[in-house]
């Protein structure tokens, strides 16, 4: 009986001193950045836009405001849709110009 208790104590001591992994648990890794979105964010208060598209989350737009706060913007917002459309058209024009030069 004493040998079993000693072995169990040794096993528990080893298990508690094993270094833990720095990786996040799966449930935290796969969480979407934006849990809720805003429909109204004044465009003049936005310093930077980030676009995230991950396998388990819908398209996400994160705005960094001039006060360094980050908020999630609804991707269906009209002005944001127009902004994305203009950006895509600009990229297409630049590609056409570069292809004509080569």
Image: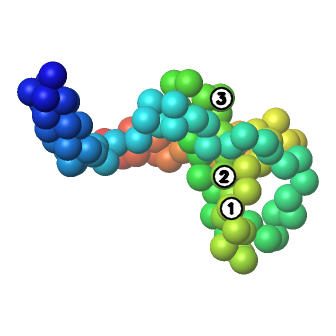
In the drawing, does residue 47 fall left or right of residue 8? right
Q: Residue furthest right?
A: 40
Residue 88 in percent (x, y) is at: 61, 40
Disc 3 residue crowd, few under 14, some 14–19, many 20+, Cα 10 Å: few
Label 1 close to label 2 by CB (< 8 Å): yes
Residue situated in front as seen by the camera: 17 or 100: 17
In the drawing, does residue 36 fall left or right of residue 97? right
Residue 2 in percent (x, y) is at: 13, 29
**Which of disc 3 and disc 1 is earlier in sequence?**
3
| Residue lying at 34% horizontally and 42% vertically, measured from the top left | 23
Residue situated in front as seen by the camera: 5 or 92: 5
Can residue 88 be spotted in the picture? no
Residue situated in front as seen by the camera: 30 or 14: 14
In the drawing, does residue 95 fall left or right of residue 70? left
| Residue lying at 72% horizontally and 40% vertically, measured from the top left | 35
- Whether 43 is drawn above or below 23: the answer is below
- Whether 50 is drawn above or below 67: the answer is above
Q: CA distance from mark 2 to mark 3?
A: 13 Å
Local secondary structure at mark 2 = strand
Residue 90 in percent (x, y) is at: 60, 47
Q: Which residue is mark 3?
A: 58
Res 77 → quadrant: top right
Q: Residue furthest left?
A: 3
Which label sits on residue 62?
Answer: 2
Local secondary structure at mark 1 = strand
Res 25 → quadrant: top left
Disc 2 residue crowd, few under 14, some 14–19, many 20+, Cα 10 Å: many
Which label sits on residue 70?
Answer: 1
The quadrant the N terminus occupies is top left
Local secondary structure at mark 3 = loop
Residue 51 in percent (x, y) is at: 59, 45
């Amino acid at each position: 009986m004493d040998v079993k208790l000693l072995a169990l104590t040794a096993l528990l001591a080893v298990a508690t001193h094993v270094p833990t992994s720095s990786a996040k648990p799966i449930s935290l890794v796969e969480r979407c950045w934006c849990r809720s979105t805003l429909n109204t964010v004044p465009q003049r208060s936005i310093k930077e836009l980030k676009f995230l598209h991950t396998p388990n989350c819908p398209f996400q737009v994160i705005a960094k405001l001039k006060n360094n706060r980050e908020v999630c913007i609804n991707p269906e917002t009209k002005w944001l849709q127009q902004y994305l459309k203009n950006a895509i058209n600009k990229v297409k024009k630049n590609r056409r110009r570069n292809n004509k030069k080569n």
